Image (cartoon, helix red, strand yellow):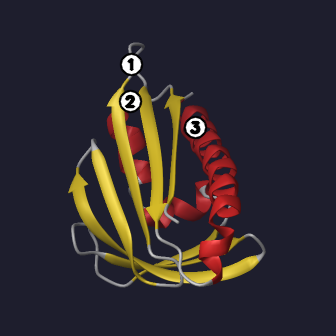
Amino acid sequence: MTVDVETSIEIDVARDQVAAFASDPENAPRWYVNIRSVVMETPPPVAVGSRMAFVAHFMGRRIAYTYEVREMVVGERFVMSTAEGPFPMETTYTWSDTATGGTRMTLRNQGEPTGFGQLAAPVMARAMRRANLKDLRTLRSLLENAAT
């Protein structure tokens, strides 16, 4: 069973600022509740082909995985997928302008769990949706508070 979770939020900060902050993997532990650490495996700046090792805690389990940047359109779209790890996953960020000059950020996670993950896919999808919404709210709070 495929897991496909998409969550969006409006942030009252210009798109270029939101995109720059969100697409910098070193900022991930600041706004992703489950991510404990990120270590760049390739030298900066982040570009297509860049790799980074993440350690997260999700549904009571420690998960270590490596993401590789697959697509990067500055200020519009950022796509990473797991190169290594227990749950093949693609994460996509997209940004668009709002009518008020802010940003609509969409976070999409999709993947095909294997083993036990297949059985737990519906539960995982609900947990991911809740976590993603919490993460996007944290991101909004960080960025809007920094802008004031």
Q: CA distance from mark 3 to mark 1?
A: 14 Å
Quarter of the C terminus within the rendering: top right
Q: Position of residue 66 (x, y in %)?
A: 43, 81
> The residue tagged with tag 3: helix, strand or loop?
helix
Label 2 sits on a secondary structure element that is: loop
Q: Is residue 30 above or below residue 104?
A: below
User: Mark 2 packing: few (<14 Cα in 10 Å), some, or many (20+)?
Assistant: many
Specify the quadrant of the image occupied by residue 121: bottom right
Disc marking residue 140: 3
The answer to whether the residues at label 1 and label 2 have Cβ atoms under 8 Å apart is yes
Q: Nearer the viewer, residue 46 or 131?
A: 131
Residue in front for this viewpoint, 18 or 6: 6
The tally of labels here is 3
Q: Is residue 46 visible?
A: no
86 with respect to 77 (left or right): right
The residue wearing badge 1 is 101
Task: Locate residue 74 relative to residue 103 in the image: left or right.
Answer: left
Q: Which mark is residue 14?
A: 2
Residue type at mark 1 is Gly
